[in-house]
Image (tube, rainbow, N blue to C red):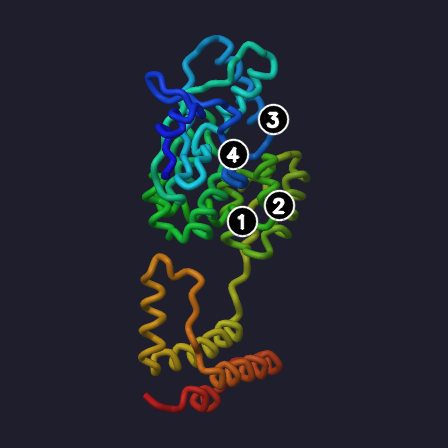
Amino acid sequence: MAHTLRSLSTDKIVKKVDGFRAHINSIKIVDGFNIRTDDDELREHIAGIAGAIAAGLPIPPLEVWVNPDSGDMELVDGHCRLQGYRLWAESNPDFDGWVSVAKFEGTPAQRKARTVSSNSQLKLKPIELGRAYLALRDEHGMSRLEIAGEVGRSPAHVDQMLLLAGAQAEVTAAVESGQISATEAVKLVRGHGQDSAAELERRKEAAKDAGKDKVTAKVAPVKKASAPSRPKVDFVVSCASVLVTHCERNADLLASIEAISADPAGRGQCVQVDAELLNDLISAVREMRQANKPLDADKQMDLIGGQE
């Protein structure tokens, strides 16, 4: 039997009045689903919800998804409200624990995206948004455009939050502690990549010398990253040229690559590439590393077969 809120009300696990009501101990919080950072601001917000409950103010229903196989009620939206109810219950033994719930219907990705689109009381922080977008991209296979459409934000915003969430730990920690704004951190990561943490330390020292606690563009300007040298660029082009030429000459391989790329579920799928080609390419790369220069024209022609 497929479980629903209505079937659970029949089993006396939830109560139906004008809407559905469920006991707070029956609502399951899925590990890793709540993307908020446990900090003073969050705890203060939860305490405020408990105060609103005490004052008899209206509290929106918790949104839950009922697992049709197990009957578990999984919380989709309202993590702070649930914690507020539990905080209220600790000091009020007369509270029966029954709260209003509303059903949420949607895919796992849509349930995850709801944590972003529904937060109107306590805004999600940039790092928290980035965590949600990373989950939608990596766990649910959504593209940046699909994420943007689902949460009602621009693709550029999604790109920035993904970049921030994927930054080095030192950078994300600095954003969460308020040492640098999310906007400045995105610029930092975009300009310095894996060297972002070192550049952040330089800028923090510059801000400190200026008597400031926070890194800003004014007190600690970004040090522009040097452009890659021409030999490095040529090195990459040489490798890419050999591999791309090989793929273009294998119609079946190219068709497989294009089909997988066009499929939203194609993330993580593999294609077969000739082992001899890869061995030649690995040997060429090692040769270029030792010589610190790109392949010469003759070597490139040897690897791609010299055919047009």
**Foreground tag (1 vs 4):** 4
**Foreground tag (1 vs 3):** 3
Residue 188 percent coordinates (x, y): 53, 49
Q: Nearest the camera: 217 or 21? A: 21
Q: Which mark is residue 203?
A: 2
> Which residue is under mark 1?
188
> How many numbered marks does the figure carry?
4
Amino acid on which disc 4 is placed: Ile
Which secondary structure, mark 3? helix
Amino acid on which disc 1 is placed: Leu
> Which residue is under mark 4?
29
Q: Nearest the camera: 228 or 154? A: 154
Q: Nearest the camera: 303 or 111? A: 111
Which secondary structure, mark 2? helix
Q: Is residue 288 visible?
A: yes
Cα distance in 3D space between marks 4 and 3? 21 Å
Question: Which residue is rendered at x = 53% and y = 21% of the image?
Answer: 84
Amino acid on which disc 2 is placed: Arg
Which secondary structure, mark 1? helix
Amino acid on which disc 3 is placed: Asp
> Which residue is under mark 3?
40
Cα distance in 3D space between marks 1 and 3? 27 Å
Which tag, 1 or 2, sits closer to the chain's start? 1
Cα distance in 3D space between marks 1 and 4? 35 Å
Which tag, 3 or 2, sits closer to the chain's start? 3
In the displayed structure, 236 sits above or below 110; it is below
In the displayed structure, 99 sits above or below 230; it is above
- Label 1–label 2 contact, CB within 8 A: yes
**Foreground tag (4 vs 2):** 4
